[in-house]
Image (cartoon, helix red, strand yellow):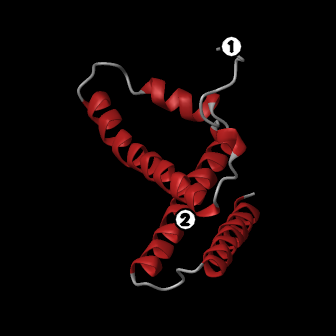
Amino acid sequence: MHNINRPISPHLTIYNSQISSTFSIWHRISGVVMFILISSPILILNQVYFSYTPIFLVEILLNYILSNWILVSFRLLISTIFLYHISNGFRHFLWDSVRHINTKKIYKDSNLLLFFVFIVTITQSYIEF
């Protein structure tokens, strides 16, 4: 038998991704990011409190190295992640209550979710900057 250099089974690149699976993956990623953002200040504060390093380093870092627009951009990104996760969680609650289960409503809810997060993020960035 000849080895033709073909894969044994089709690869994932030939499949179209479903919007529900894409939103599910991003919901899990945003949950992990939220957990890291919530738990990391506790670990950092614990390290700063029990270390002998002067706190002047933190003050210099915040005042001189990081400018205001970087901090505002991070805050905007973090709030967008929280908003997406909470909105998509509400959509999962609708699915658990056996509402909006058919394909048309799933696509409609997905588009409404993206539109809502986009509008709130644009409004918040307008207010911040």
Of 108 and 18, the residue lying toward us: 18
| Residue plotted at (65% across, 67% down) | 117
For the C terminus, the image quarter is bottom right
Looking at the figure, which quarter contains the N terminus?
Answer: top right
Q: Which residue is painted at 55% across and 53% down in the image?
A: 26
What residue does disc 1 label?
2
First along the sequence among labels 2 and 1: 1
Q: Residue at x 68, y 65 (%)?
A: 124
Q: Is residue 117 above or below residue 77?
A: below
User: Which is in the foreground here, disc 2 or disc 1?
Assistant: 1
Q: Is residue 94 left or right of residue 83?
A: left
Res. 93 image quadrant: bottom left
State the residue in front, 48 or 113: 113
**Quick check: 5 left or right of 22?**
right
Amino acid type at image mark 1: His
State the residue at coordinates (52%, 68%): 88
Give the answer, above or below, for where 62 lies relative to 86. above
Mark 2: which amino acid? Leu
Residue 7 on image: x %, y %: 64, 26
Mark 1: few/some/many CA within 10 Å (<14, 14-19, 20+): few
| Residue 45 in the image, given as x and y percentages of width and height | 32, 36
In the picture, the disc for residue 83 is 2
Q: Secondary structure at mark 2?
A: helix
Task: Tell me the SS state at disc 1.
Answer: loop
Residue 65 lies, in percent from the top left, at 63, 28
Q: Residue 78 got which mark?
A: none
Identify which residue, 86 or 38, lies in the foreground. Answer: 86
Q: What is the distance, in whole Å, between disc 2 and disc 1 at their CAs?
A: 55 Å
Q: Nearer the viewer, residue 121 or 117?
A: 117
State the image quarter where residue 43 is shown.
top left
Label tally: 2
